[in-house]
Amino acid sequence: MMPYLIGIAVGLVTSLVTWWIGLGRDRAFYPTVLIVVAAYYVLFAAMGGSGRAVLVESFVMVGFGVVAAVGFRGNLWLVAAGLIGHGVFDVFHVRLALTTSTPPWWPAFCMAADVALGGFLVLLLKRQMLSATIGAPA
């Protein structure tokens, strides 16, 4: 239970603090976060020393990177879906058993953080506090 609670707290505090200081008001912030969270499994695969796992995780990371790029250039709703989707991916990722170097608490923590970050982005977009598309008023 603790990894979920800490993940939610980290996601919400990150969103709130970055909004407060202005970083989270830039439409590039959440796409960048999506790319970074997808990179962690590549790190874990590299730590485990499996070239196959690094390759598989790199392909997955590229997929989320494409979602981040297309969402940034097009519509941030796609990025919100990507963050929440990465949270769902975290739940199933452990079943892939690509590497043993992923900490056992990581999938729960990352899922909760991803969903909290994506949920906060949804809130910003719904309240029009952040523009979903380039050039549109916030």
Image (spheres, helix red, strand yellow):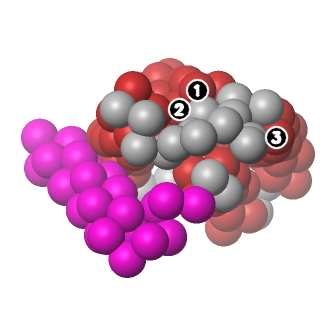
Q: Please tell me whether residue 124 belongs to the stretch shown in magenta.
A: no
Rendering coords of residue 118 (x, y %): 43, 37
Q: Is mark 3 on a helix, strand or loop?
A: helix
Within-10-Å neighbours for mark 3: few <14, some 14–19, many 20+ = some
Q: Is the residue 33 above or below the residue 125 in the image?
A: below
Q: Please tell me whether residue 24 belongs to the stretch shown in magenta.
A: yes
Q: Which mark is residue 77?
A: 1
Within-10-Å neighbours for mark 1: few <14, some 14–19, many 20+ = some
The part of the chain drawn in magenta is 1-26
Contact between labelled residues 2 and 1, with CB atoms less than 8 Å apart: yes
Quadrant of residue 122 in the image?
A: top left
Within-10-Å neighbours for mark 2: few <14, some 14–19, many 20+ = many
Q: Is the residue 45 above or below the residue 58 in the image?
A: below
Rendering coords of residue 105 (x, y %): 31, 50
Quadrant of residue 76 in the image?
A: top right
* Res. 105 in view: no
Q: What element carries label 2?
A: helix
Q: Residue furthest front?
A: 137
Amino acid under disc 1: Trp
What residue would you read off at disc 3?
73
Amino acid under disc 3: Arg
Q: Which residue is drawn at 26% across and 53% down?
A: 12
Q: Residue 80 carries which label?
A: 2
The residues tagged by marks 1 and 2 sit, at their Cα atoms, a distance apart of 5 Å
